[in-house]
Amino acid sequence: MTDELTGRDARYDRRTVMKAGLAAASTAAVGAAPAGASGGSASASAEASLEDWLKNVGNFDGIVDERGKSTVTVEVGAKGNDGAYAFGPAVVRVDPGTTVVFEWTGEGSPHNVVAEDGSYESEMQGDEGATFEQSFDSAGVSRYYCGPHKPMGMKGAVVVGDVEVAVPSTDGAASDAESGSGAGGDSIDYDGWFENVANFDGTVDRTGESEVTITVGAEGNNGAYAFGPAAVQVDPGTTVTWEWTGAGGSHNVVAEDGSYESEMQGSDGDTYERTFDSAGISKYYCGPHKQMGMKGAVVVGSPNAAASQEGDGAADGGDDLWLYGLAAGLVGALLSPLLFGAFLRTKDDVTERSEPPQGHRSH
């Protein structure tokens, strides 16, 4: 038992050292990144890019030129990103020294304004008319977001001065949303599931909520043939309730992998519940209207973390097989001389029994 525990401890010690080495290498790589690589600073620069920053911002419609004004107002909780989850306008250009006043609409639950580089941050507010002011003195680009709703696309930017800025094409906003950015900015691969889903506009972050409601028969796909929102991200243990609008005829909720299926329903207020305990992606559809694009997905926890855990399990299995193989080899090596000796002794016994006694002759 002592030898077995010692071997197991050695195996885990070796794995711990390897993981620590990888962690140290990752830290060194991050530390080696050039200062300001995140691009969140508003300091002067010859040019900047907002293409990645705005890729899931549904209400971006070009840079609004507000130069010539000493004070500029940006709405917090403007219409956008499937609700009142936008800054309006998303991007403004101002002169150095301009004061930007962020004014809350009172819609879309509490919001805040957080600079990506940490240079400013408002309180979490939700009352109509609440304000937060920030002056921008130096030429450059300042990126900001709403903390709770950043994954939904509630982000913005202030371009100060005549800085050249690359922005995404407004015609490509829908295709950019196909990447499905989820909580924490992780890219969620739906493997083409939403290719024909017209109302899919990225993954809506609903983590932190124990119960989440999805509308069945929402507007989309040329009628009331959509789940709204099409994709949500929740914590493990969350209960998702699908609630029918009564529009678009009868619908149902069918898991792609066959793990669950609701009844066919069509009355306003009908519901179906499902609790999701394990991390992963659950894709589902409406049977009669799947071909029209009536599909959805529930992202539970972090799929990347789940994949990492599976990888660790596979690695442990590999170590165990290697140890089993080594043990089998050692046992075989130890037993081989004993077996060979037993074979020789058996052979001698057979020989002795087959030879006639000395002095005896057959007639």
Image (tube, rainbow, N blue to C red):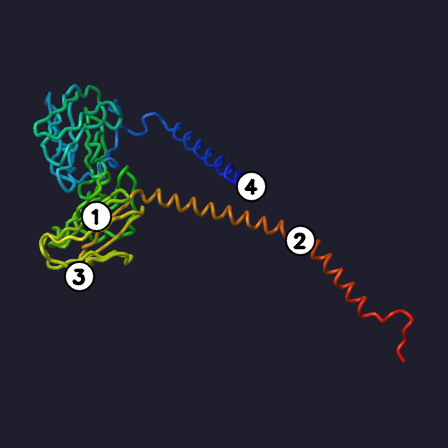
- Crowd rating for badge 3 (residues with CA inside 10 Å; few <14, some 14–19, many 20+): some
Q: Amino acid at mark 2?
A: Leu
Task: Report the mark closest to the observer, 3 or 1.
Answer: 1
Q: Nearer the viewer, residue 352 or 238?
A: 352
Q: Which residue position holds label 3?
A: 288
Provide residue 99's location: percent of width, then percent of height. Answer: 14, 21
Q: Nearer the viewer, residue 175 or 271?
A: 271
Q: Which residue position holds label 4?
A: 7
Quarter-of-image position of residue 225? bottom left
Provide residue 78's location: percent of width, then percent of height. Answer: 11, 35
Q: CA gap, disc 2 to disc 3? A: 67 Å
Instruction: Looking at the image, tell me whether mark 2 or mark 3 is earlier in sequence order.
Output: 3
Q: Amino acid at mark 1?
A: Val
Q: CA gap, disc 3 to disc 4? A: 58 Å
Q: Amino acid at mark 4?
A: Gly
- Crowd rating for badge 4 (residues with CA inside 10 Å; few <14, some 14–19, many 20+): few
Q: Which residue position holds label 2?
A: 335
Which quarter of the rendering shows the N terminus? top right
Q: Are marks 3 and 4 in contact (CB under 8 Å)?
A: no
Which quarter of the rendering shows the C terminus? bottom right
- Taking the spot 21% from the left edge, 25% from the top edge, the residue there is 121
Q: Is residue 66 above or below residue 249?
A: above
| Label 3 element class | loop
Instruction: Looking at the image, tell me whether mark 1 or mark 2 is earlier in sequence order.
Output: 1
Q: Which residue of the protein is positioned furthest toward the bottom in this rendering?
A: 363
Q: Which residue position holds label 1?
A: 240
- Crowd rating for badge 2 (residues with CA inside 10 Å; few <14, some 14–19, many 20+): few
